[in-house]
């Protein structure tokens, strides 16, 4: 039987300093790592904030994404998730879909994208330098780079990308009153993808959508599966990467000693990216909602069948039980085999499919930015930065920066 306790917290929390996780996370980790919260929809869920408890949720299949997508299930967003989305499936249906697309994100295939990602980054920074300083790294680098990369992989033509951006921005809205706009945007996105897929079925073009539209040893995605899969990959590949570039760069600008260290030691970029992923808040929830399919003991609390849980990876990544000095940004923080690793890409069967691609984009974008723009710093006081609100992804609406004019590096 579901808990009859009254939630003491409303979630998501509003951060006083959006560049940092809300302070409620630290308090809950110490006092109540599994706490009952009220969501914007009026539903209730157990918010999980401790590192080890979050890992348990992410790896325990009794916490089901499919159950969270079922009609009437507690939800965080104003409209229910797509039932056919890979994000809403459990094995074996999830395993089938993931296996059909995994080839596109192997280490070798992703490594082969480096020259094109580097060329796109260089071209965007060329334009930024020609027009500034100052310049906006969100509009000038992060957004167009992330959108171009995922659209190129999927096979979305250049002329459709701005409309794609607007639709995906709307789809991530958390405001209940905006449910109508969200549904309309999702429908428009699927309609566009439907026409695009039909074209690719007539003429194979070698991109990921073309491959997904083909037969695979007698297996073929249904039309609805294909549209939802394409929309999911587009949204995840664009929003999360663009936000990570912006938020990671801001973290370096707010910690100039770490920016100086990275500039002096370029080989640190791979380690620095892992640390920035751990350190910077991403999704406001920090993890996708799940529903227990049976009673489960978690952090001293009994989660009843049918109750929702939200595993906050954002909170887990600042847990002192897993990381020494968790609130300190250290671009040379060692990543050691056998030691706790950050959960920015999740854990278990739903570990982010595009993690290797996201890492590459971050390494190229931030590494090139640090190398090419000496004296890089904020162009406005940090308190004047404007953060997006009421969306699933926490990031800036703009990242205005300046640098030493006339001294860019090639």
Image (cartoon, rainbow, N blue to C red):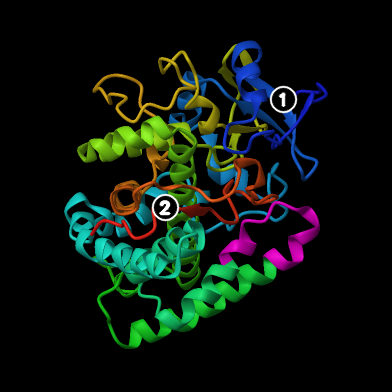
In the image, residue 332 lies in the stretch drawn in magenta: no
Q: Main secondary structure of the magenta part?
A: helix
Helix, strand or loop status at disc 2: loop
The x, y position of residue 309, in whole percent, is 62, 32
Q: Pointer 1: residues within 10 angstroms few (<14), some, or many (20+)? A: many
Tell me what residue is drawn at x 32 percent, y 75 percent: 210
Residue 96 shows which numbered tag? none
The x, y position of residue 348, in whole percent, is 39, 35
Residue 36 shows which numbered tag? 1
Magenta region:
168-182
323 horizontally vs 119: left or right: right
2 or 1: mark nearer the eye: 2
In the image, residue 179 lies in the stretch drawn in magenta: yes
Helix, strand or loop status at disc 1: strand
The x, y position of residue 240, in whole percent, is 47, 51
Mark 2 lies on residue: 403
Whether residue 65 is situated above or below residue 1 in the rendered picture: below
User: Which of the 4 quarters of the picture holds residue 265?
Assistant: top left
Q: Of 2 and 47, which appears nearest the observer? A: 47
Q: Is residue 123 visible?
A: yes
């Amino acid at each position: 039987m579901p808990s009859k306790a009254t939630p003491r917290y409303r979630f998501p929390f509003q951060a006083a300093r959006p560049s940092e996780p809300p302070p409620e996370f630290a308090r809950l980790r110490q006092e109540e790592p599994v706490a009952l919260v009220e969501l914007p929809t009026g539903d209730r869920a157990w918010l999980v904030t401790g590192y080890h408890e979050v890992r348990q949720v992410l790896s325990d299949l009794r916490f089901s994404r499919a159950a969270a997508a079922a009609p009437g299930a507690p939800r965080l967003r104003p409209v229910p998730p797509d039932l056919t989305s890979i994000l809403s499936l459990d094995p074996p249906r999830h395993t089938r879909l993931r296996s059909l697309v995994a080839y596109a994100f192997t280490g070798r295939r992703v490594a082969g994208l480096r020259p094109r990602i580097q060329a796109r980054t260089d071209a965007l920074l060329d334009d930024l330098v020609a027009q500034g300083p100052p310049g906006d790294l969100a509009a000038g680098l992060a957004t167009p780079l992330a959108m171009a990369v995922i659209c190129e992989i999927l096979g979305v033509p250049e002329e459709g990308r701005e409309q794609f951006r607007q639709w995906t921005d709307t789809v991530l809205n958390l405001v209940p009153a905006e449910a109508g706009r969200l549904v309309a945007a999702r429908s428009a996105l699927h309609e566009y993808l439907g026409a695009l897929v039909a074209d690719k079925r007539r003429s194979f073009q070698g991109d990921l959508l073309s491959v997904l539209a083909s037969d695979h040893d007698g297996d073929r995605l249904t039309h609805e599966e294909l549209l939802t899969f394409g929309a999911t990959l587009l949204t995840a590949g664009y929003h999360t990467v663009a936000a990570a570039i912006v938020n990671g760069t801001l973290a370096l600008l707010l910690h100039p000693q770490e920016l100086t260290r990275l500039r002096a030691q370029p080989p640190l970029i791979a380690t620095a990216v892992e640390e920035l992923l751990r350190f910077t808040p991403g999704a406001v929830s920090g993890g996708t909602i799940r529903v227990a399919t049976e009673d489960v003991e978690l952090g001293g609390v009994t989660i009843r069948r049918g109750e929702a849980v939200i595993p906050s990876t954002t909170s887990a990544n600042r847990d002192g039980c897993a990381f020494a000095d968790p609130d300190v940004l250290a671009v040379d923080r060692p990543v050691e085999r056998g030691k706790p690793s950050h959960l920015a890409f999740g854990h278990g069967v739903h570990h982010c499919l595009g993690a290797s691609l996201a890492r590459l984009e971050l390494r190229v974008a931030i590494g090139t930015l640090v190398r090419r723009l000496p004296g890089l710093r904020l162009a406005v006081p940090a308190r004047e930065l404007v953060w997006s609100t009421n969306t699933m992804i926490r990031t800036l609406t703009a990242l205005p920066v300046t640098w030493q004019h006339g001294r860019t590096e090639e």
